[in-house]
Each structure stands twice: as structure tokens, then as C-alpha cells.
């Protein structure tokens, strides 16, 4: 039985997150991988109740870099069951757990024909690219959040503006109700004034009648006549005072009506100006909101179209490479067919000559045939070499293009891979 310290193969020092659980039904927790081989791994985890003990079963999920001949690498994800073969105390709060796999990995992570410095450099470059990608994603998320916040702020401003407009309309309704009440009070006052005027006219008529009665009574009684004259004078004074008061009341009512009319006109002009200003501000807010929404939709459309453009470019590149490869293969097949047909024609001609010459020239013909076969073999070899040169160049070009396609595929697939 091998532990994390006496594994036979070389280990890959690789610090990366690893998730593990004691049982399938338990919720996985996250630790940090220290090193890994095909038979097991070592990880760090805090010293608490979830830390597994020695010889306990454990299920792990982790990723291991698989380096290729290029400058990049692929991360291979594994799910392995095993057991804890050793637990070391790194500090009072951290434990180092050595895990032995029940089933080994399909390759040796520490023996991949790459130096440790190159592996570290590639891992560092990959981590840096992942950090930059995360930073770009966070920046895009922040910009999207700011745009949503602006939209929300504009929506709230629009709601508040509508509420203000509603309040202004309610205030306008209240002002109109007050004006109607004042007009009604004025109508009642005017009705009361007309009634008072009728009463005054009746009083004047009665006073005249009394004056006539007093005049008649003056002829019968002088003393009563003096009294009646005094009363008449008093009545006339009262009538003049009431008439002056009535004139003043009418002038006051007219001035109040004029002031009320001016106030109504001023209030109407003010409400119209407020309605125009509010309509302008509301139109500006709506235009700004539409512009923000259109900008967000355009950004989402660009983000959606960009992967499609990349996929179309990759498809065009693959189609071009396949077309060139097929053309080269067809050209090579045609060349070989021509050479084969030429050799067959030469063989037929030699056979006919040999049949005509007879048995006397059999030896000579045999020698000539062997020489001819040798020459045709040499010609075939030279033609094959001449044809092999463009084939090798085309094959090399095709191999380079296939390698380029593989790199493009790895780059595109690597953007969606979670390490």
C-alpha cells in the first residue's frame, strides 16, 4: 500500500480547488489540492468536524492539467472514490489529507515530458488569463448593473413625475372647487342684495305714504305735525345712509368680482405653464430612458452575434482546408494512374516484340526486357519522387492548417471550460 509520501511515480505540485465528501448523500466541501499523481492526491483542509479521518472513505472531484506539445494545456476533470490513508497536522487549524484512489487516472500528471518551470509558467499564464476573463466578466456585470440602476432610477423618476402631475391635477381640481364655491357665495350675496333693495323700495314707498299721512295730520294737529316732520327727517337721513351703504357694498362687490376674475386668470396661466414644463421634462425623461434601453439591447445583440461570427469563420476555414486536401489527393491519384497506365502500355509493347522475334532472340529479348523493366522502375521511382515533393509540401501545409484548427478549437472550447 502506497501513501502520499512514498508514491513511486513523480508527483505534480498543483494548487487548485478540490471538492470532496465522505458519502454521496453528504454535501461536498471545498479544499485545496497540494499535489497529485495517478494513484492519489494530497489536499489541505481546515480542522473541524467535516475533516475526514484516517482510513475513512471519500469521494473527490478535481481537475488536472494535461499538457500537449503546444503552448497551452487542457484541464481534465475527474471524479474518484478512495480512502484517506494519512492525516497530518500542518498547524492548529489546517490538516494535510492524503487520499488513495480506488481507480488510477489514465495518465501520470507528474510525467508529461515537460519541465517543472514550463509547467508552472503555463499554469501561471492560464491563471492570469482566467483572472483577466473574470475581470472582464465582472466589468461587464458591473456595467450591466449600472445600466439597470439607471433604468430603475429613471423609472422611479418617471413614477414620481406622474405622481406630481396627479397631485397638481388634484390641486387644480381643489382650486376649481373653491372658485365655484366663491361664485356660489357671490350669487347668494347678490340675491340677498336684490331682496334688501326690494325691502328698501317698499320702505321708501311706505315712508312716502306716511309722509302724506303726516301732511294731512299737520292740518289737524300742529304738534303732531312737528313730530311727524321730525320723524320724516330721521327717516330721510336713514334712507340716505342706507343708500350710501348700498352703493359702497355694490362697489366693493364689483371690486371683489374683478379681483376674483384676475386671480382665476392668473391661476389658469400658472397651471398652463406648469403643465407645459412638466410635459417637457416628461418627454426628456422618456427619450433618455428609450436611449438607455436601446443601448442595452444593442450591447446584448453584439454579445449574441459575436459567437455566431466566430463559428462561421471557423467553418469557412475548415471547409477551405478540406477542399485543398481533397484537391491534392485527387491530383496525386491522377498522377499515379497516368504512371501506371504508361507502364502497362510499355509492357504490352515489349510482349508483342518478344512474340515476333521468336526463340532465337529469346535471350536478347530477356536482357532487353530486364533493362527496360529496370529503366521503367527507375522512371517510376523518379516520377514518384517528383510527385512526392509537392505531396510532402501540401501534406505539411495541411498538417499545419489542421494544427491551427485544433488550436482555434481549443481556444474556443477553453473559454467555456471551468477550471
Image: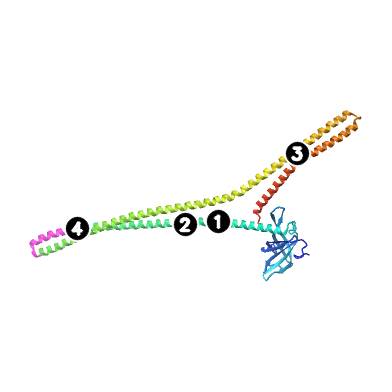
- Which residue matches tag 3? 333
Q: Give the magenta part as a residue range.
A: 202-223
Q: Which label was assigned to residue 242?
A: none
Rendered position, 387 above or below 78: above
Q: Where on the picture, by quarter, is residue 170?
A: bottom left
Q: Is residue 108 magenta?
A: no
As for residue 215 lying within the magenta part, the answer is yes
Q: Nearer the viewer, residue 256 or 180?
A: 256
Between the residue at mark 1 and the residue at mark 2, the CA separation in whole angstroms equals 21 Å
Return the residue at label 2. Answer: 157
The secondary structure that dominates the magenta segment is: helix
Of residues 393 and 72, the one nearer the viewer is 393
User: Circle 1 is placed at which residue position?
Assistant: 143
* Inter-mark Cα distance, 4 to 1: 88 Å
Q: Position of residue 191 (x, y in %)?
A: 26, 57
**Kind of element beneath mark 3:** helix
Q: Where is the N terminus found, in terms of image quarters?
A: bottom right
State which tag comes first along the sequence, 1 or 3.
1
Label 4 crowd (10 A; few <14 / some 14-19 / many >=20): few
Amino acid at each position: 500500500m502506497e501513501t502520499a509520501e512514498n508514491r513511486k511515480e513523480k508527483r505534480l505540485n498543483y494548487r487548485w480547488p478540490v471538492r470532496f465528501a465522505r458519502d454521496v448523500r453528504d454535501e461536498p466541501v471545498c479544499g485545496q489540492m497540494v499535489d497529485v499523481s495517478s494513484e492519489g492526491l494530497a489536499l489541505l483542509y481546515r480542522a473541524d468536524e467535516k475533516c475526514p479521518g484516517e482510513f475513512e472513505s471519500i469521494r473527490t472531484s478535481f481537475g488536472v492539467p494535461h499538457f500537449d506539445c503546444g503552448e497551452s494545456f487542457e484541464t481534465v476533470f475527474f471524479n474518484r472514490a478512495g480512502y484517506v490513508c494519512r492525516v497530518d497536522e500542518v498547524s492548529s487549524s489546517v490538516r494535510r489529507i492524503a487520499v488513495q484512489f480506488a481507480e488510477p487516472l489514465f495518465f501520470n500528471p507528474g510525467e508529461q515530458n515537460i519541465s517543472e518551470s514550463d509547467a508552472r509558467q503555463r499554469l501561471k499564464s492560464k491563471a492570469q488569463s482566467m483572472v483577466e476573463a473574470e475581470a472582464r466578466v465582472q466589468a461587464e456585470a458591473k456595467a450591466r448593473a449600472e445600466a439597470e440602476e439607471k433604468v430603475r432610477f429613471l423609472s422611479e423618476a418617471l413614477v414620481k413625475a406622474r405622481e406630481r402631475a396627479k397631485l397638481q391635477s388634484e390641486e387644480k381640481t381643489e382650486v376649481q372647487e373653491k372658485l365655484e364655491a366663491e361664485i356660489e357665495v357671490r350669487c347668494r350675496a347678490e340675491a340677498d342684495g336684490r331682496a334688501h333693495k326690494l325691502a328698501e323700495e317698499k320702505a321708501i314707498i311706505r315712508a312716502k305714504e306716511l309722509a302724506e299721512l303726516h301732511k294731512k295730520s299737520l292740518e289737524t294737529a300742529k304738534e303732531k305735525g312737528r313730530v311727524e316732520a321730525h320723524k320724516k327727517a330721521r327717516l330721510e337721513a336713514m334712507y340716505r345712509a342706507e343708500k350710501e351703504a348700498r352703493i359702497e357694498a355694490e362697489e366693493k362687490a364689483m371690486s371683489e368680482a374683478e379681483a376674483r376674475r384676475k386671480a382665476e386668470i392668473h391661476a389658469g396661466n400658472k397651471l398652463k405653464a406648469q403643465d407645459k414644463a412638466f410635459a417637457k421634462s416628461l418627454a426628456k425623461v422618456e427619450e433618455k430612458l428609450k436611449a438607455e434601453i436601446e443601448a442595452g439591447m444593442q450591447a446584448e445583440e453584439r454579445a449574441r452575434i459575436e459567437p455566431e461570427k466566430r463559428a462561421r469563420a471557423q467553418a469557412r476555414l475548415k471547409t477551405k482546408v478540406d477542399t485543398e486536401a481533397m484537391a491534392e489527393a485527387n491530383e496525386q491519384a491522377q498522377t499515379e494512374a497516368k504512371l501506371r497506365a504508361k507502364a502497362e502500355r510499355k509492357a504490352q509493347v515489349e510482349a508483342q516484340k518478344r512474340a515476333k522475334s521468336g526463340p532465337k532472340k529469346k535471350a536478347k529479348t530477356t536482357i532487353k526486357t530486364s533493362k527496360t523493366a529496370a529503366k521503367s522502375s527507375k522512371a517510376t521511382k523518379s516520377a514518384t519522387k517528383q510527385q512526392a515533393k509537392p505531396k510532402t509540401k501540401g501534406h505539411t501545409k495541411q498538417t499545419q492548417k489542421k494544427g491551427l484548427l485544433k488550436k482555434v478549437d481549443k481556444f474556443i472550447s477553453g473559454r467555456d471550460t471551468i477550471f
